[in-house]
Every structure is written in structure tokens, then in C-alpha cells.
Image (cartoon, coloured by chain):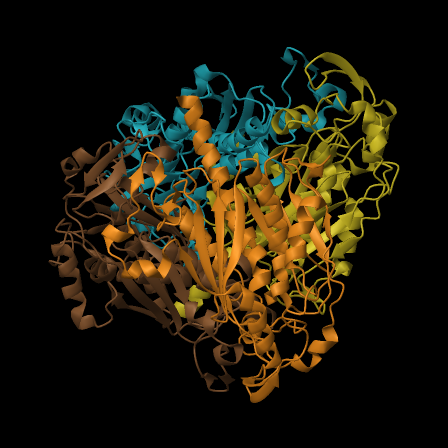
Chain colours: A cyan, B yellow, C orange, D brown
């Protein structure tokens, strides 16, 4: 299932070493300004090869818009966007043809789909997130028409919470042929109250779905998160005044519906599984073996995931905005 | 959006103080044994009024099956089930008619839908989870045909991890007109490898969606969860041997696909927001006021949520099992 | 798949001889007036047992609304409605337990689902249309808020086009232990331009889906229909003036989008397959046999299908209205 | 809504004069042989510029596969395919910038989406059918694994039923600056019994949806079609014997489920609305004017629609095959 959303539908495709990756966004309202100028800054943040902290795979990641834009605005028709793979070095993966990399989807994909595209993980590669960022860029343009903005920050890297020391922690892990994870916080401000719907449409449920769909995410918190489990009700309830909510343990969502307070989500990112150390594993026909994952890999993907998580938050909010537009459209008429 | 699932579709409805709550399960395969005998034990676990620890609202919660079952088995037709509300004391809510309870969806619903069913929270009440347990009971019967079983346990209540002291913690909070939250762990064993699909269909994404759709859940972890953010790759990767995975930091899911190891999910439940203490809040027209939430409320809903979380896990796995059946059905033919 | 619609989602359930039939309508906007008074006149038109022309099965078909309505209006929550089966005479079907009735779904259901509910066709019975009429009644209330009205008329019965002779044609067929079909025309007036979307969302595509989903429908035409195949372009194109469309060969839809002209659909209904004549058929294990279908059956269902077809048209238009509300909501903001 | 299907999901995009048209097929089972060799013969049948009977717009329509294929087979990942627009002569449409062509979607699109891509109809152009044929080619490969084959024939052109005279009828209309429509019959043979599901999933409903989604289709018949309305039940019911159905008025579908007999669908195609004659119309701001549609247009698109209708039939059957695979997969296990 490669489609996110029911109203604002983003269908993604592409493999790490195939010809191209892309996304089709269907259900985007017309008259939203959109072009490569809105894509570039976000794509740049996700792009590899920029710093010694990330993989040296060098992809320009230039987006080509194939449909749905006319004279600099959306038309209401599906917006298709693609990015070509250019610097794929598939031969580097030849030694992995029959070996399951620990912490990766290799074996699971092989068992499910019957063979596997060994070239860089195929569709299970983190490279698929380019599709998410392209869709996210469009979603953010939709949100901008309502004054909603999205931001993120790295809270922790490898257990370290001082941003000044993040690079150091990553380089140390890299030097030891190892990797580290971390924690990201993503926020949306300017959200109106009323985004979200009951049960399966709860805004927090959609956020849980979106965030856990990012590879390497092992935990998601909204507002107070796991700390809520240790609080009293009297402490956790956010008092309400005519000026707004006094605190934000709710993370901007009550009963699955946005309250108007900032939406706050935190995600836990596991350490990159590709490490240049010998690891115990099996071949695709389940024989014991060892593997050392060479190749060009990030020792920490937390910084690059920020823009992906922002994109997913943007998709969820745009989806909810479409749903809310129906409710409001009828209410304003019937009143 | 009150439907969960694309293949195994559970559409839920009903309000806390309306005539009935229910669910329609569409897409359930035929020839699965199902009847009230499969519903009773699960409904009983969710049912209020059983102990001094839970709300005294006394609902028999007897399920009536309206369709889709013939001679003790599913027919492939939609299975509709309802439960009548009997002990609803709507008048207890009259004083809350124009007041937003902190920590509840009251204000958000009012702002979105234009007025609100003040009687016990309407659809945003935790009572809606009876629909989830009914659907879950059917899903568990489907899973049973493949040898998959589901379980849960309370890990923490109000910060306390010793199960012998949970009751004490809850009763103390109750005595102080307050409430506590906690942490639950839900597991599935016997899952074959291959459940889940890329991107939006990732098994962990679907679990994130399902768990965050339960009211009061503020955090979700899979496998190592937030601890992963502080581990090294060499430590987090689960070594694979011909005998299986040596550890289970993955929580049974890699790349969004089940590995065959047990699936392990933990959820953080916030303290019940209904507390009999004066709290700062607003009226529906946003004037400052105070509210004390009287009525019949749990001081801790963690124990009663166990069966709800198990049900949601069952829905997600059954959904994935249907998808996997397509892939396998074609592969066995084409081979 | 028992759900119609993506925005205005109607999930239907129930068998001819089970406990009840029903529908859950999810995505209905709030503040739409609705109650049994809106259901009664439509249900009455579909109800059997009213005249010598229809089956004597006597069902009061009283609707019970289980959720989603508060103080006479929709709340935005799912509206669940059920009708109990009361006059089901299942024993009348005992002789059909192992025999496939020609023109019915008996054999196909048996081959697909492994056994069959022989009691009146189970879910494949025309009795399932009560769910459609309940949902249609709600949809018509939504349409009424925009001034859209729906109507139908019988154009032909058994090849006869003079309405004064329809009863005669039907009674003659009945007397000969036979049945007749006919043609219905369903229209919507007051539709704004702009309902419908490209490709799979085309209004005519959705109408084709909705109308062919009614049992016994073998053909569907929009506007000029099959006659269009014999016209020249110069003849078929509807000239446009500042006062509107001069003709309506389009049937109110161009490029899948409503033009503002009346929407006109015609459906061909096959003769009822249940006839009290010996017919060649097979048993469920494919042995040759003969069958005479006794029981209480309409000799012509065309008149009773009118309200069902109107209901389906109402569902399609309400769905399109929701989609159009999103487009308009964004356009009015961005302008 | 540019996605067809729930299990076998085809998301289409592209405009007549934009950079490219394409489709993403998600949910295709793995291990299905597929490549450009399967696309070419179908694309060639749809391609314009081949004969004096069709538009001289010359498009090679070479398909580029962007994802989802590895070593000549599907992988279970989304298959994305695109075709570049090369011979688009947008300037030819400059005179139409503010004029609504009768019989086209111009005005309706303008009224809905706020402006319009005047270059050849944008997304409402018949050129969008290249996406359908690409998806259809893949679907036919899936069907081939089960021995299902699809065919079509032109039954009528401009009222003429003798195939030897079709070219003559078309050329005569062309010479008179006019156009003609016609009737196509599409069939599937080798379908197993059991394809289709109740209510919204009925095979005939899905076919009605698919066929009416093709531009220019004004009527759809299954099996006996409109003729059924004039038949008696005794005449219309297809007798069943142990050797199969004696006749096929049902068109291979009963109760929405395939019977195993050939599936037979007929569609009525309206005459091409683009004609080089002066026609009464309005400007986009609803002022009266006249228009003569110059440019490169087919005088009859019936022959070129054959492969499009076959493709839509293939999509519907593949979708149903996926659903049926779930039912069968569980039944074979539980038995």
C-alpha cells in the first residue's frame, strides 16, 4: 500500500537503484502556487552527499513535475513528480545478493515477495523518502494558504542532548564503524481547531500512522507522550482559559481533534543498521553466515529525517484540512 | 472516518448515550467459526461495573449479531454487531451542557461540529471501544485459523511497575479525587513472516495508527522503542541465525514487514481526564469558568484498555493477513 | 465490498432472512435535519405487500436509527439505521436448499463462498435494497440543503410504453406464471455545475457503478444513451447559450462533470427470475435437475425499483457534493 | 479521483499537452512477467496518427517503466509507467482560450476549477487513455497467469453494422466536417466463477463504473442489456445444465458474481464532439459566441476505443481476481 490519504492522496513509487522515484498527489485543491522553487529547499535538506556526516552518494535530486501544474499553480488535477536515480552504484551490492543484512528488510522482503532487489534495498531503502518530501512540499504550500507552518528540531543524538555535540557523537560512531540514533520533535503552528475526525480519522492516529511509516522510527509520542503514563490527571489536564490552553500536554490534540494549540510530535529513530562491522546473519536460503555492510551509508540519519517527518506531518494536516473543509462548507451553508 | 482497514474493513458507530453502539465488519473471509461465545470473554474484560477499580456504570454489553453469520460460521457477507446502551444516566451530564471538560474532546467537537452531544462525550467517549472489541473478537477468530495469538499485560500504573501494587495506586488516586495512567504491552505470537507492505502499508505504521486511535494513548513504541534512540547500531541490530532472530529489538517488524518473531507494542495511557476536582476551563462560548467532573468514572482505565489494544492489534494483523493472502495466492499459482 | 462512496460512505449489511438489514452512513455533514419522518415515505414506496402487483411478503420496514442523530439533526457522527426482518418464511425455501435457481446468484455464491444461505437468497436478495433506501433518504436530505431534487418514472414495462397499461401487462405475466422487466428514468434537477472529478471520479462513471449495483439492472444510459451511437456530432453536441444548454443529449454531464442541466439516467431492468414454471437447472453439486420457484415474488419489480434508483442517484450526488465542497472551500479562501 | 481499484490500484495522471502522462499500479502481485514487449502491441492499437481515419497527431507513445519491474518480472512494488507528450501543438488551441467547445468538458472544468488548461482539453482529453492502456497491459499479464483473455469488436459505426462499410461511413462524415459514434462489444473468456462481491463490489457495477469512466461513453449494457427490459422471465433466465449455462443473457454475471460463462459488455460511444463546423456556444464568462473546432481530430474514435475498453475490463477483472484470491486462500486453509 503506497498511498497515503483519502482526500489528499499521495501515491509513491520507486526503488533505490531503479530508474526513478516519484509521487502522484491526487485531490490537491486548485489555485495553490507550486513549482520547483518550493521543492528545492526541502529536497536539499534531505539530499545526501552534502556533509561528512551523511552518505557520500551524490544525487542532485532534481524534481521534474509531469502534470497538474499550469502557469505556476495547481489545477486540481493529479500532480506527478519524479526524481531520477543517477549515482546508484549497484555493483557495490553484488556481495549482498544472497545475504540478509541485519536490521534491514532484506529477509522479510525475500520471504514475502519471493526474490529481492538486492541493489540498495530496493523499495525498502530510505531513498524512498524523496517521494515523501516532494509530496510534503506541495502539502506545505496548501497549508501555507491557511497560515499553518511546520518545523522540526533534533532533540537527541546517540543519547546526547546538547546540539553542539551532535556532530562529535556521530563522527565518533562513524570512526568506530558504528551508528547512532536519536529523537526528533516536529511541530505545527497556526492549526485551526477542528482538524481530525472520530475513530480511524483521529489526528493523532493519522500522525502515528505517518510517523511509523518512516523507516527506522521505533517510537512516537504526542504532547506529553510516555511521561503522561506517570502523571496524575490533575497534573496532565491542560487548563483552558478564554485566552487559550494554559499548558500543552495534549500536544494540540484532544479526542483526535486539533485544539488550536501547537501540534507536537516526537519520534525515536533507531541507529542506522548498515554498519561496517562483521555481523551474524543468514543467507536467503537460511544458512548461517557473517556480513560486513560496506558501501556509502549515513552513520546517523536523524538530521536528514527532519524534513521527512515534517513532510509527513504536512500530509496528515492537509488531509485533515480537506475533511474539515467539507464539514465547514456545509455548516456555513446550512446556518 | 470510522472505518479501519482496506481488506478487512471495520466500520464503527455509536455514542455513549445513544440507542446503541456497533460495528460492521466487511471483507471477513467465509467459514470462520464465530458466535456470541467468542465475544463474551472479551466483552467481559472491557465491561465496566465489575470492580471497585472501574466505573460503576453497569452495562451487560450483550452483543446481538445482525448479519453475516449462518450456522455458526461467517459467510463472507458483512458481519454487523450491536450493543444497546442501557444504564446511560444522561441527566448526570446536564450541568456540563455548556462547559468544556479539560482533557476531553468537548470543546474541539463543539468547535468542529457546531454543537455537542453533552451526554457523556457522545462519540468521543471511551464507550465507543465496545465496537473495537466486537470487531477484535472476530479478527481473533480469523487469526486463530492461522495459529496467531494475542496477549497483553499492564507494565506500569501511575509510575509503579510492581503489579501487586497497581490496585493500591489506583485506589489512592481515587481517594484523592484524582486519576493515574500507565503503560501496556501488547504482543502477537505465531505471526508468519511477510505481514505488511511498503510505505503506507507498513505493519508498524498500521499499528501506530491503530494504537493512537484509542482514546488516552499518548505514546506508542515498537520493540526497543525510545530506547533505540540511545543505542548503537551494533547493539540494536538483531543478529539472525538459521534458528531465528537472536534478539528482538525490532519488535518483530523490519522494513514494515513481519519477521516471524513476536510482535511487541507498548502504549502510554494518560490519566483519565474526568476528575472530581475543581478545574479551570471555559464555557462553549469561551467564557472562563470552573468545573468539577462528577459522575461515574474510572480512576485508571489502563486495565480495561488491555482488551481494546489487543483488539486493535488483531484488526491490524487480520488486515495484513488478507493482503498477504493475495501475494501468496498468486505466487503459489505462478511458481 | 459493501461500502459506497469515499467521502459520504454508506456501508450496508444484512440478509433477506437474517435478523436485520442496515446501513451505516459515515461522513455525513452535521446539522442536516433527519428523522423517521424523512425515511417513511421512501421506505413505503419500496415496501412489499402493498398491492396485488408486488410480493405479499408483508414487512412494516420500520427504521430504527441507532446513532448519529441528536435533537433531530445529524451530528457529523456515523448514522446507523436498521430494519428488522419479521415476515421471513424461511421454510418456504427448504426445497431450494440444494438447487440453483436460474437467473439468481445461488450457484455463483455457492461456488465462491462455499455454502449458501438458501433462505431467500441471503445477501443477494433484492431485500438488501432497504439499506440503499435508508441511506438514500439521508442523502436526499443533504441534497435538499442545496435545492437538488430527485425523481423517477417508469418508461416501459414488458415493452409497453403506455403507463395506463402497465398493471395489465404485469398481471397478464403473473397469470402466466411469468414475469416482465422494464425501463426506468431517474433525474436530478437543481444540480450545480461542477459535480464530479476526472477519471475514476467522473459523475457518469459513479452513476454507472451505482445503477449496475442494483440487482436486475442490465443496462444504463445517460442522456442520449445508445441513441448517441447513431447520431452525428453536429446533431449530438448540445449548443450552449448564455441562457444555458439548448438541448440535453449530454444528460447533464460533460467530461464527467455536471453542467447544471438536469441529470438524466435510464436503466434497463430484467424480468424477475423467480417464476413458477419448471426450469432446467442444477443442484449445488452440479447434477441436472428441474426447479419451479414457488413462494412470494413480484412479477415485475420495476415500479418498486424506482425509489432504489433514486436513492442511488442521491448517494452519487451527495458524494460529488462533498468532493466539490473541498474544491470550492479552497477556492473561496485563496481568491 | 484518479485511482481505479482497491486491491489492484491504478492511479493515473497527465494532461494532453503537459510533459507526460502516466500511471502507477500498486498492489500488483509479484512474479508476473512484464516489459515493454507487452505494452507495445496495445499502445500501438490506441496510438493516433496511424491511418487516414484517425487524428494525424503523431505520438510514438513509447512507454518508460520507472519502477516495480526487476529482471523482467513484477516485484510486488508499485509499477510506474510514463509516456512523454511530443507532438503537442498547443498553439493550435490559442483561439479556444476563452471559448467553450460544445460537447466538451471545457465549461464544466472552468466552472469547477476556476480556470482551464485550454491546450487540448488538459486532463479531460481522450489522450488520458494512454494511462489506461498501460495499466491494462499489466492487468492482462496478470489475467494471463489464470488463462483469462480479453477481446473486443466494433458492432456499429454511425448506425452501420456491416464492418466492410465502417471506413466509408467515417470518411463520409469527415468529408462533411462531421463525426460519427458507434457501439463496441468487449468480452472476457476463461473467467472462473466467483469474481465479484456483493453490493458495491458487484462485477457488473465495477464494469459500469469502468466503462462510463471512458470519455464519450453514453450507454453500457451487460449480456442482454436493454433488450432484457422487453423479455419475459421464462425467456431471459439462462437454463443451467451440468455442462454449463445454455444461453448467456446474463453476460456471465449473476448477482454481481461471475458464473464462468463469457463476460459480455457493450458500450455506446457518442460522435466525437470536435467538428469543423460553426457551433453555437459561449465564452468562459458566459457570453454568446460561435466556434469552429479546427485542429487534428478523429472523426470517429470507436476503433481506437476498443483497446481502452479492453484495458478497463482487464482492470476490473484483475481487481476481482485479487479479492477472490483472499476468499479462496482462506477457504483452502480452513477446509
Specify whether residue C105 is in view.
Answer: no
For the point 72% across and 32% down, the residue is: B182
In this rendering, would A272 be left or right of B285?
A: left
State left or right for residue B281 relative to residue D210: right
Residue at x-position 55% and y-position 23%: A263
Q: Position of residue D9 (x, y in %)?
A: 41, 52
Residue C98 found in image quarter: bottom right
In the rendered image, the quadrant that contains the N terminus of chain B is top right
In percent of width and height, residue C228 lies at: 31, 58
Residue D193 versus residue C202 in the image, above or below? below
Compared across the picture, whether B201 is left or right of C237 comes to right
Residue most extreme to the front: C164
Which residue is depicted at the point 62% across and 44% down?
C138
Q: Can residue D143 be seen in this snapshot? A: yes
Q: Which image quarter is the C terminus of chain B in?
A: bottom left
> What is the count of numbered marks?
0
Position of D115 with respect to B309 (left or right) is left
Q: Percent x, y for residue D36?
A: 22, 57
Residue C53 higher or lower than A126, as above or below: below
Residue A267 locus on image (x, y percent): 52, 30
- Residue at the spot x=31%, y=50% of the render? A95
- Using the image as rendered, state which of residue D61 and residue D104 is in the foreground: D104
Amino acid at each position: 500500500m503506497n498511498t497515503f490519504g483519502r482526500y489528499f492522496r499521495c501515491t509513491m513509487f520507486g526503488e533505490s537503484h531503479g530508474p526513478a522515484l516519484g509521487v502522484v498527489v491526487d485531490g490537491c485543491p486548485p489555485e495553490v502556487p507550486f513549482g520547483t522553487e518550493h521543492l528545492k529547499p526541502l529536497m536539499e535538506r534531505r539530499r545526501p552527499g552534502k556533509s561528512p556526516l551523511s552518505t557520500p552518494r551524490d544525487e542532485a535530486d532534481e524534481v521534474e513535475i509531469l502534470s497538474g501544474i499550469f502557469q505556476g499553480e495547481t489545477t486540481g488535477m493529479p500532480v506527478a513528480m519524479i526524481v531520477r536515480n543517477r549515482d546508484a552504484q549497484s555493483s557495490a551490492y553484488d556481495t549482498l545478493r544472497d545475504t540478509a543484512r541485519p536490521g534491514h528488510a532484506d529477509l522479510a522482503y525475500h520471504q514475502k515477495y519471493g526474490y529481492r532487489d538486492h541493489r540498495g534495498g530496493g523499495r525498502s531503502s530510505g531513498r524512498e523518502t524523496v517521494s515523501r518530501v516532494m509530496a510534503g512540499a506541495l502539502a506545505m504550500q496548501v497549508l501555507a494558504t491557511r497560515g499553518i507552518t511546520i518545523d522540526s528540531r533534533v532533540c537527541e543524538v546517540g543519547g546526547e542532548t546538547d546540539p553542539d555535540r551532535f556532530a562529535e557523537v556521530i563522527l565518533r560512531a562513524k570512526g568506530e564503524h558504528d551508528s547512532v540514533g536519536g529523537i526528533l520533535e516536529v511541530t505545527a503552528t497556526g492549526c485551526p481547531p477542528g482538524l481530525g475526525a472520530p475513530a480511524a480519522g483521529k489526528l493523532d492516529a493519522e500522525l502515528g500512522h505517518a510517523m511509523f511509516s518512516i523507516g527506522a522510527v521505533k517510537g512516537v509520542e504526542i504532547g506529553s507522550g510516555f511521561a503522561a503514563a506517570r502523571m496524575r490527571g490533575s497534573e496532565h489536564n491542560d487548563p483552558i482559559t478564554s485566552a487559550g490552553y494554559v499548558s500543552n500536554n495534549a500536544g494540540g490534540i484532544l479526542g483526535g481533534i486539533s485544539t488550536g494549540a501547537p501540534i507536537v510530535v516526537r519520534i525515536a529513530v533507531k541507529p542506522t543498521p548498515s554498519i561496517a562491522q562483521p555481523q551474524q546473519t543468514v543467507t536467503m536460503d537460511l544458512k548461517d553466515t557473517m556480513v560486513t555492510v560496506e558501501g556509502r551509508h549515513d552513520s546517523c540519519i536523524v538530521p536528514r529525517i527532519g524534513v521527512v517527518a515534517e513532510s509527513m506531518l504536512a500530509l496528515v494536516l492537509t488531509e485533515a484540512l480537506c475533511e474539515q473543509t467539507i464539514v465547514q462548507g456545509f455548516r456555513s451553508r446550512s446556518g
